[in-house]
Amino acid sequence: MNEDKYDPDNPMHKSRKVHGRTFVKGMSQRQFDLLDDFLPKVALDVDLLRDKGIEALFDEAKAEYCMEVGFGGGEHLARQARENPDIGYIGCEPFQNGVAKLLIEVEDDGIDNIKVHADDARTVLDALPDGCLDKLFLLYPDPWHKSKHNKRRFVSAENMAQIARVLKQGAIFFVASDIPDYVSWTLRHLMNDANFEWLAEADQDWLLPPQGWQSTRYERKAQRNGRKSAYMFFRKL
Ligand SMILES: C[S@@+](CC[C@H](N)C(=O)[O-])C[C@H]1O[C@@H](n2cnc3c(N)ncnc32)[C@H](O)[C@@H]1O
């Protein structure tokens, strides 16, 4: 396989209706092999999820179920899964290079509590039953700076309605962003939403990373460029 060539007939390279890149050159042969051979073993079965519920995805019942939307290179997701083997994780990321990075960690460390959806998280949200998730992580969603592109932002009325539906009562929706306009956009959406309560009581509750925080590639780049992050916890009411 030519590693640099986008192949529209290869299902792993297919173009998706997610705004942003799905695939770029620069993956190693091992990463291609992982996408071809290993991903099917850890891939989330959307039909199974829709038909039998979240418990059916994992070999054994889990104490909690969590999801990360747009996990990038998967640093945060892999660490969560390693530290909490009794929790079942769903990770969604359409960017194939990121998926391949996560798969290296999953294979090397024998992580067996992540189901990977290498595509649009909205498909998984649609398939999830009501009130089944304990936590949903959204770390550094694509900012879509131009106002004419704001409607592409993952924090939207439509996605918040779905997230409210799939979270248990008392569950946590966590959003990190380094873009001031996205932070105020998120607070505007969530604070005007009767389904959510923002948990910050003081500046340190949202302007400092939570204890034991796993930084991500995107966050490190933001820090190098002098941008500070906000870490926002919302409780589903
Ligand atoms: C700015 S990057 C941040 C990646 C990672 N969370 C991090 O902190 O390094 C945003 C990511 O969200 C992913 N993304 C965008 N829309 C998505 C969607 N509808 N479902 C799942 N992931 C999505 C993109 O592919 C991209 O990898």
Image: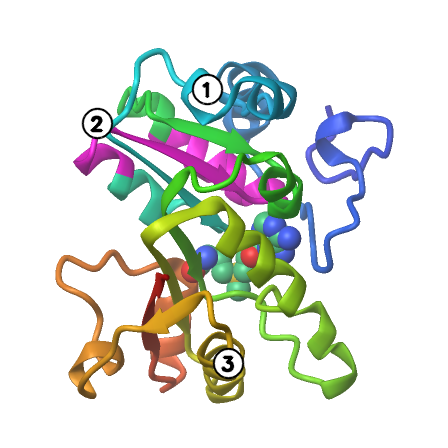
In the image, the residue with mark 3 has its CB under 8 Å from the nearest atom of ligand 1: no
Residue at 47% x, 39% y is 91
Image disc number at residue 192: 3
Q: Dot 1 corresponds to which residue?
A: 57
**Location of ligand 1 given as a quarter of the image:** bottom right
Question: What residue range appears in magenta?
Answer: 81-105
Residue at 44% x, 42% y: name it. 131
Q: Which of the pair 87/15 is nearer the observer?
A: 87
Task: Tell me, yes or no, whether the highlighted magenta stretch contains residue 132.
Answer: no
Q: Position of residue 164 (x, y in %)?
A: 50, 56
The percent coordinates of residue 39 (x first, y second) are 54, 22
- Which secondary structure, mark 1? helix
Using residue 197 as the reference point, say whether residue 34 is left or right of it: right
Give the amino acid type for the residue marked by disc 3 in the picture: Asn
**Real-space Cα distance between discs 3 and 2?**
34 Å
Residue at 41 percent across and 76 percent down: it is 222
Residue displayed at 41% across by 45% down: 74
**Kind of residue indicated by mark 2:** Asp
Q: Is label 1 in contact with label 2 (beta carbons under 8 Å)?
A: no
Give the residue at mark 2. Answer: 86
Give me the disc on residue 99: none
